[in-house]
Amino acid sequence: MTKSSNRGCRITDREEILLLVTGSCYIGDKVKVIWEMSARIFAGQREMLTMAGFLPGTDDYAVRIGESFAKQGFMDTLAAQLIRVEPGCVEIGFPFSRHLTQQHGFVHAGALAAVVDTAGGFAALSLFDAGDGVLTVEFKINLLAPADGERFVARGQVIRTGRTMTVTKGEVVAIKDGRETVCAVMQQTMMRITGRANVIG
C-alpha cells in the first residue's frame, strides 16, 4: 500500500501486500485490480479489497450501510435495493415504474439523481469510521440518454477520500432486453460528519 497504512487509503505498491485475487493485471511495480478481490492478508490481518482499491473503515461496513439504507423512506418509495456493497463501491438497483416517469414515459431525472447520489454516499460511508455519518455537499449530473429500461442500476465509486471531504463518481444504467445503456453520470462531493448523534450512517 502507500506509505500510510490507515484505513481508506489506496493500494498501490504490490511489494507491501499479499493478495488473494480472482483476477488482476500488473503494470511495473504497481498493481491494478480489474476484478473483484476475495481477500488481503498483511501483517496478520485479513482485510477485504475491491475493484475500487480501498480498505473499509470498519469490519462491519456492509452491515452499517444496510441498516442506514433501510432507514431511507425515499429509496423504499422507489423500490430500490442494495445489490452490491464493497469498500468504496456500492450499487443500487430499482425497477421501472410509471409512477417515476416524466411526460414522455422515461424515468424522471430526479429519480436517477436520487439513487446515484445515494450509491455514491454509501460508497463513501463504507470507508468511514463507526459512528460517522455522510451528507452530500454537491453533485453534478449529466443525462446522456433517455432513461428507458425495464430496470436500472446506479453505481457509486469513491475517487478520492480525505479526512472531511470525499469525492465520488457514479453512473446509472438502464437495462432493457438484456442490454445496458448508460443514461446518466454524476460526480459528487460528500462530507464526513463526526460527533453528531443524529447524523450517523
Image: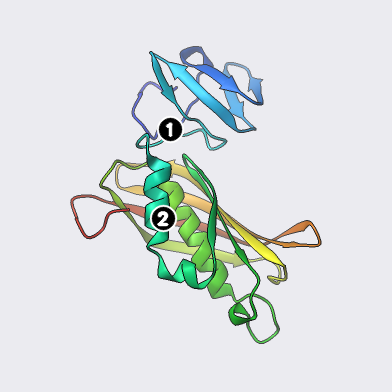
Circle 2 crowding by C-alpha within 10 Å: few under 14, some 14–19, many from 20? many
Question: Which one is in front, 117 or 166?
Answer: 117
Residue beneath the point at 46% across and 57% down: 188
Marker count (numbered): 2
Question: Residue 72, located in which quarter of the rendered image?
Answer: bottom left
Can residue 126 be seen? no
The amino acid type, in three-letter code, at marker 1 is Leu
At which x and y percent is residue 85?
50, 45
Q: Which residue is mark 2?
A: 189
Residue beneath the point at 67% across and 64% down: 151
**In the rendering, which numbered label is found on residue 24?**
none
Residue beneath the point at 41% across and 47% down: 124
| First of labels 1, 2 by sequence position | 1
**Location of residue 166 with respect to 40 vertically, above or below:** below
**Location of residue 22 with respect to 149 vertically, above or below:** above
**Applied colour scheme:** rainbow
Separation (CA) of disc 1 from disc 2: 19 Å
Circle 1 crowding by C-alpha within 10 Å: few under 14, some 14–19, many from 20? many
Can residue 153 be seen? yes
At which x and y percent is residue 7?
36, 31
At which x and y percent is residue 179?
79, 57
Q: Taking 24 as reference, is 52 left or right?
A: left
Q: Secondary structure at mark 1?
A: loop
**In the rendering, which numbered label is found on residue 55?**
1
